[in-house]
Image: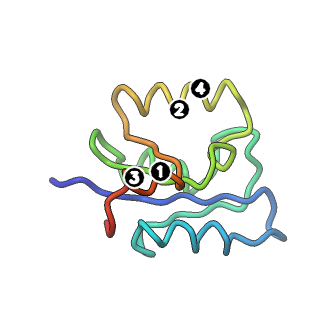
């Protein structure tokens, strides 16, 4: 199986808008591969993020594109744990501005 590219966007409440993040993610990720949550970043228990880690089965070689680290989590401990998993066995995470490292499409 080849490398897959997913995008993840999050805002903290249902009243907030995801559009700016999605527009930026679409520069590198197919729309059908962008998952979103409208939920607090206090922990990682969010439906779309858990789907990325579970049912979609992010695996070694996959890329998860986020617009900024705080979209993943506001908890430094959670963020550190996720980044350690990303660097060792789960997936590669790159910031949006590092666009030269992100393949087009996906």
The residue carrying pointer 3 sits among few (fewer than 14), some (14 to 19) or many (20 or more) residues within 10 Å by Cα, namely: few
Asked if the residue at tag 3 contacts the one at tag 4, i.e. Cβ–Cβ closer than 8 Å, the answer is no
Question: Under tag 4, what secondary structure?
Answer: helix
Disc 2 versus disc 1: distance between alpha carbons?
A: 19 Å
| Residue appearing at x 45%, y 45% in the figure | 53
> Could you tell whether 71 is left or right of 14 in the image?
left
Disc 1 versus disc 3: distance between alpha carbons?
A: 27 Å
Residue receiving disc 1: 98
> Could you tell whether 32 is left or right of 3 in the image?
right
Mark whose residue sits in front, 3 or 2: 2
Instruction: Give coordinates of residue 77: x percent, y percent.
Output: 67, 24
Residue toward you, 61 or 67:
67
The residue carrying pointer 1 sits among few (fewer than 14), some (14 to 19) or many (20 or more) residues within 10 Å by Cα, namely: few
| Residue appearing at x 48%, y 72% in the figure | 26
Residue receiving disc 4: 80
N-terminal of the pair, mark 1 or mark 3, is 3
| Residue appearing at x 42%, y 46% in the figure | 54
The residue carrying pointer 2 sits among few (fewer than 14), some (14 to 19) or many (20 or more) residues within 10 Å by Cα, namely: some
């Amino acid at each position: 199986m080849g490398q897959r590219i997913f995008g993840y966007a999050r805002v903290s409440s249902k009243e907030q808008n995801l559009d700016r993040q999605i527009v930026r993610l679409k520069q590198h990720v197919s729309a059908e591969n962008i998952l979103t949550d409208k939920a607090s970043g206090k922990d990682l228990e969010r439906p779309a993020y858990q789907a990325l880690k579970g049912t979609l089965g992010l695996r070694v070689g996959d890329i998860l594109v986020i617009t900024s680290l705080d979209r993943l989590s506001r908890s430094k401990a959670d963020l550190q744990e996720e980044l350690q998993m990303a660097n060792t066995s789960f997936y590669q995470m790159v910031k949006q501005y590092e666009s030269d490292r992100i393949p087009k499409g996906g």
